């Protein structure tokens, strides 16, 4: 009887060790957004984002967040990471705009500190918008953009419980494009 119990104990221990080894190997294989190369691997690992043509435009760290605007087959997008307890950046949000030369994204940062919203503008070489005016509850923010270049621009939004956003876009000659 003691021999059977020892065999069962050994089998259970072997199974536990195998499970732990599998868990550890999977944890070390996981990709993080710790550098440009690993960010590209993370983006390509996500369904719908596994294109070869990815150009990272900027890596911006804001407290424990990492925001990375990019062009995916020349379409604007961004990916957001949060630093975990081990110091690795885990992705938690990704977004892209198809068939656009200019895109704006409302980036929500984690944590209770305000302001925790930013507007992110991402352009490719086909962009003809030179200036954006953003009206947030009557407060006007202006941002210059590079025309016919891939670029990134940010607007820090003020503290608001709720907000209404209105845009005006201008070409390089100062003419209103759309409202």
Image: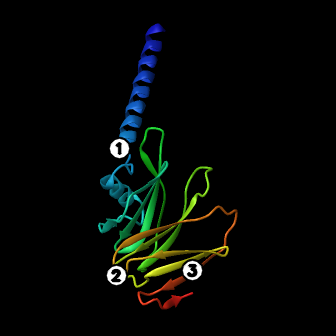
Q: Which residue is mark 3?
A: 167
**Residue drawn 29% across the image and 66% down it:** 52
Q: Which residue is mark 2?
A: 148
Q: Are marks 1 and 3 in contact (CB under 8 Å)?
A: no
Q: CA distance from mark 3 to mark 2?
A: 20 Å
Counting other residues with Cα less than 10 Å from the Cα at mark 2, is it few (<14), some (14-19), or many (20 or more)?
A: some
The image shows residue 172, relative to residue 26, as above or below, that is below
Residue positioned most to the right: 161
Q: Are marks 1 and 2 in contact (CB under 8 Å)?
A: no
Query: Residue 109's quadrant in the figure?
Result: bottom right
**x, y percent for residue 61:** 44, 53
The residue lying toward the viewer, choosing from 156 and 26, is 156
The residue lying toward the viewer, choosing from 70 and 133, is 133
**Residue drawn 44% across the image and 64% down it:** 78
Counting other residues with Cα less than 10 Å from the Cα at mark 1, is it few (<14), some (14-19), or many (20 or more)?
A: few
The image shows residue 166, relative to residue 54, as above or below, that is below
Numbered label attached to residue 89? none
**x, y percent for residue 107:** 53, 63
Q: Choose mark 1 or mark 3, whichever is in front.
A: 3
Query: Residue 160's quadrant in the figure?
Result: bottom right
Q: CA distance from mark 1 to mark 2?
A: 39 Å
């Amino acid at each position: 009887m003691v021999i059977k119990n020892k065999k069962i104990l050994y089998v259970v221990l072997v199974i536990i060790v195998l499970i732990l080894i599998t868990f550890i190997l999977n944890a070390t294989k996981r990709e993080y957004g710790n550098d440009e190369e690993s960010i590209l691997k993370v983006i390509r690992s996500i369904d719908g984002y596994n294109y070869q043509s990815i150009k990272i435009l900027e890596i911006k760290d804001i407290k424990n967040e990492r925001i990375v605007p990019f062009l995916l087959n020349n379409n604007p997008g961004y990916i957001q990471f949060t630093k975990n307890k081990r110091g690795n950046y885990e992705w938690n949000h990704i977004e892209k705009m198809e068939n656009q030369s200019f895109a704006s994204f409302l980036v929500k940062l984690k944590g209770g500190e305000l302001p925790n919203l930013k507007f992110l503008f991402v352009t490719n070489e086909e962009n003809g918008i030179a200036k954006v005016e953003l009206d947030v509850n009557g407060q006007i923010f202006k941002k210059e953009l590079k025309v016919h270049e891939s670029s990134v621009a940010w607007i820090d939004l003020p503290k608001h419980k709720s907000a209404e956003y209105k845009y005006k876009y201008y070409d390089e000659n100062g003419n209103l494009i759309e409202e």
